Image: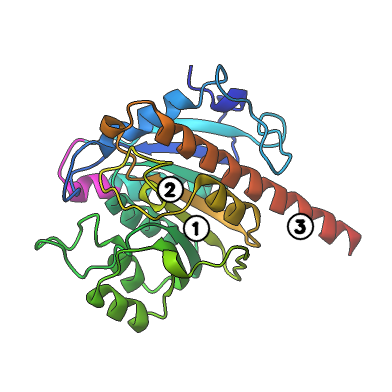
């Protein structure tokens, strides 16, 4: 049963919407991320987890979380990307938060395009082993190695912070400098810090940001990454208006014990919990004023 710890509801009016994008046609090395949405859902069962978050939120009673299923994958990549954009725009039009289950990282591009219809300014917190800012990769401008080059071109992003990077090339460092990207390389991350964002915040989590010891179910193993605990602490310490997120690059074909899928579920739960908690705290402050 895929019920997000018992938090999932069937509702036309919702505050958070799960949306699967089972797409891996832009993967450069290994297929498999198209299987991730179902693997993540399967690991969300209330038989294994409950609906409480570390920030103290009960996702069942304190928000309305629904699952809108998967985006239809028929057609070429431009057709699929258009469908993703429209679905995301629809969720945002209901004043709800999209939670995207990828898929390879190329899907972040049309997701952010959907955000362009609602937001004129956006900040992005990007967890990844890779900057994903190639101008093109193996002749493909829409490769999963290129989404943030395409996203930055749109002009909507005011601040991009990349955390956990440990594979930056000279080309990608140049791109980061061009767009004033804050690249927090793994080797330089301090033991304790918190991040604050001024504009509405989108969070993109590539599961290979985690060390392979914590997340073996990814196509690109890159040792020396974050622990699950480190990532969760960064989420819990965020000062931001969270408006959307994606979790990408989980490859169930390498996730034989489903530990990476379980980590993905945990991360999603805590991001949603942090969003709801921040909103409640903001409401209390406004009442006091």
18 vs 252, nearest the viewer = 252
- Say above or below: 259 vs 274: above
Name the residue carrying label 3: 282
Query: Which residue is at a point 66% across and 34% down the rendered structure image?
Result: 59
Q: Residues within 10 Å of mark 2 (few under 14, many from 20)?
A: many
Residue 274 screen position, x and y as percent: 65, 48
- Say above or below: 35 vs 111: above
Classify residue 254 by image quadrant.
top left
Of marks 1 and 3, which one's residue comes earlier in the chain? 1
66 vs 33, nearest the viewer = 33
- Say above or below: 51 vs 1: below
- Cα gap from disc 1 to disc 3, whole angstroms: 18 Å
Verify whether residue 183 appears in magenta.
no
Residue 75 screen position, x and y as percent: 16, 40
Which portion, as a residue range, is magenta? 74-82
Q: Residue furthest right?
A: 288
Q: Which mark is residue 246?
A: 2
Left or right: where does residue 193 sit relative to residue 83?
right
């Amino acid at each position: 049963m895929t019920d997000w710890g018992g938090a999932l509801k069937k509702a036309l009016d919702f505050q958070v919407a799960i949306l699967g994008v089972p797409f891996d046609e832009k993967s450069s090395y290994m297929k498999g991320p198209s299987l991730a949405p179902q693997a993540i859902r399967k690991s969300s069962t209330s038989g294994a987890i409950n609906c409480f978050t570390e920030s103290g939120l009960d996702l069942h009673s304190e928000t309305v979380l629904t699952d809108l299923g998967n985006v239809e994958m028929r057609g070429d990549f431009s057709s699929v990307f258009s469908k993703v954009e429209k679905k995301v725009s629809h969720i945002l039009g209901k004043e709800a938060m999209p939670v995207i289950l990828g898929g390879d990282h190329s899907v972040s591009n049309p997701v952010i395009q959907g955000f362009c219809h609602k937001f004129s300014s956006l900040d992005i917190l990007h967890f990844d082993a890779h900057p994903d800012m190639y101008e093109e990769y193996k002749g493909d401008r829409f490769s999963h190695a290129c989404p943030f080059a395409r996203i930055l071109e749109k002009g909507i992003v005011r601040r991009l912070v990349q955390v956990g990077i440990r594979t930056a090339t000279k080309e990608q460092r140049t791109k980061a400098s061009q767009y004033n990207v804050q690249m927090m390389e793994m080797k330089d991350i301090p033991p304790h810090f918190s991040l604050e964002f001024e504009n509405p915040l989108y969070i993109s989590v590539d599961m290979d940001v985690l060390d392979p010891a914590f997340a073996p179910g990814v196509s690109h193993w890159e040792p020396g990454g974050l622990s699950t605990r480190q990532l969760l602490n960064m989420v819990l310490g965020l000062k931001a208006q969270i408006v959307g997120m994606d979790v990408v690059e989980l490859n169930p074909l390498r996730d034989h014990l489903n530990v990476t899928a379980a980590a993905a579920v945990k991360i999603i739960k805590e991001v949603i919990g942090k969003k709801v908690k921040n909103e409640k705290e903001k409401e209390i402050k406004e009442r006091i004023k």
